Structures are given as structure tokens and as C-alpha cells.
Image (cartoon, rainbow, N blue to C red):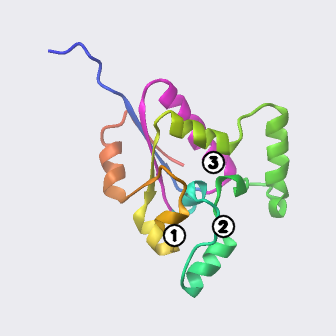
Amino acid sequence: MSDAQPVEKASIVVMSGDMDKVMGAFIIANGAAAFDMQVSMFFTFWGLKAIQKGNLTGKGVMGRMLGLMNRGGIDRLGPSKLNFGGMGRVMFKMMMKKRKVMPLPEMLKQAQELGVKLTACEMSMNVMEIKKEDLIDGVQIGGVASFIADASESKFSLFI
């Protein structure tokens, strides 16, 4: 019999593309990974914005309109409240910098360095006409079954 402790796991669904909610997801993911937990993040629908490169997406008329109006890229995310047509994002970034809060792109990089598993929802990608090439490096593509497999073994699962 082994004395080794079982690895604790955490799973997070990121459905929101709002700056504050994505930030909360990465703070929790990075904190759990720092405590030696295996962390998986499953990005679906608007959450995909956080793991996109920021290029225009879509082939069909609807997909291109969606890609234009909802352009991805973690540095483009705006807050859920008080966005003021994009000024809220600038304001929050300034306030965070002043208080030495790690910016979202660095939180994403830290998550990758800590080994957080980033998975893009294949169904959401298909609906929104987002291709693998539109995603940042290091993201895998999976369906809900991959999230359920991770979540079923997790100490906690969050939906953000």
C-alpha cells in the first residue's frame, strides 16, 4: 500500500467573457494550482473570448458578424458592470495597475506555467465559428464529456 496522498483536483467552467468574472476564475485556478491541485478550466460560449488570440473569426455572415461584435482576446475583455463603451476596461486596468494587481494576460500565463489544463468547448466553437487556429497556444479542444470526466474527480467544481 502506498503512503502517497491522492492528487486533489479542481474544475472550473468559464462561461462568461466578462473581465471581472474571468479574473475571478483565474485567481481561483492559480490559487488552487499553487496548492498543488490539478486544475482544469473549461471555456464555453462567451468564456472562449479569454482564450482567443483576438483575430476576427467566422466564415458565414452570422459568424463574421459575431466575430466582429464579440472579438476575443483576454486583453479586450470588459467588466460586467460599468463598461461605458470600453472606458470601463481602461479604468479598471489603470486602477489594477496602481494597486499592483496582476493583469489578466499575466494571470493566463501564470495558469499555463502552473500546468492548469485549458479546454475550449468544441460545440461552442462550432456554433460561434471559432477555429483551433483562433485560440492561444496550449489550449486543447474537448466536449462536455471531458469536463464531466475532470469534474467527477474534483474536490470542487465552479461555474463562472
Residue at the image position 54 percent from the left and 85 percent from the top:
60
Q: Secondary structure at mark 3?
A: helix
Spatial CA distance of label 1 from label 2 is 11 Å
Q: Is residue 111 left or right of residue 79?
A: left
Q: Is residue 60 visible?
A: yes
Q: What secondary structure is marked by label 1? A: loop
Give, as a single range, the part of the protein colored magenta: 17-44
Q: Where does residue 40 sit, x and y in percent of width and height?
A: 43, 42
Residue type, mark 2 in image: Arg
Tell me which amino acid carries mark 1.
Ile
Q: Measure the C-alpha gap from mark 1 to mark 3.
A: 21 Å
Question: What residue sits right under mark 3 in the picture?
Answer: 21
The residues tagged by marks 3 and 2 sit, at their Cα atoms, a distance apart of: 17 Å
- Is residue 8 positioned above or below 5 on the image? below
Specify which label sits upstream in the sequence, 3 or 2: 3
Q: Which residue is mark 1?
A: 130
Out of 154 and 119, give the one closest to the viewer: 119
Q: Residues within 10 Å of mark 2 (few under 14, many from 20)?
A: some
* Vertical placement of residue 14 versus 86, above or below: above
For marks 1 and 3 on the same chain, the one whose residue lies earlier in the sequence: 3
Neighbour class for label 3 at 10 Å: few (<14), some, many (≥20)?
A: some
First of labels 1, 2 by sequence position:
2
Q: Do the residues under discs 1 and 3 have CB atoms within 8 angstroms?
A: no
Residue 71: assigned label: 2
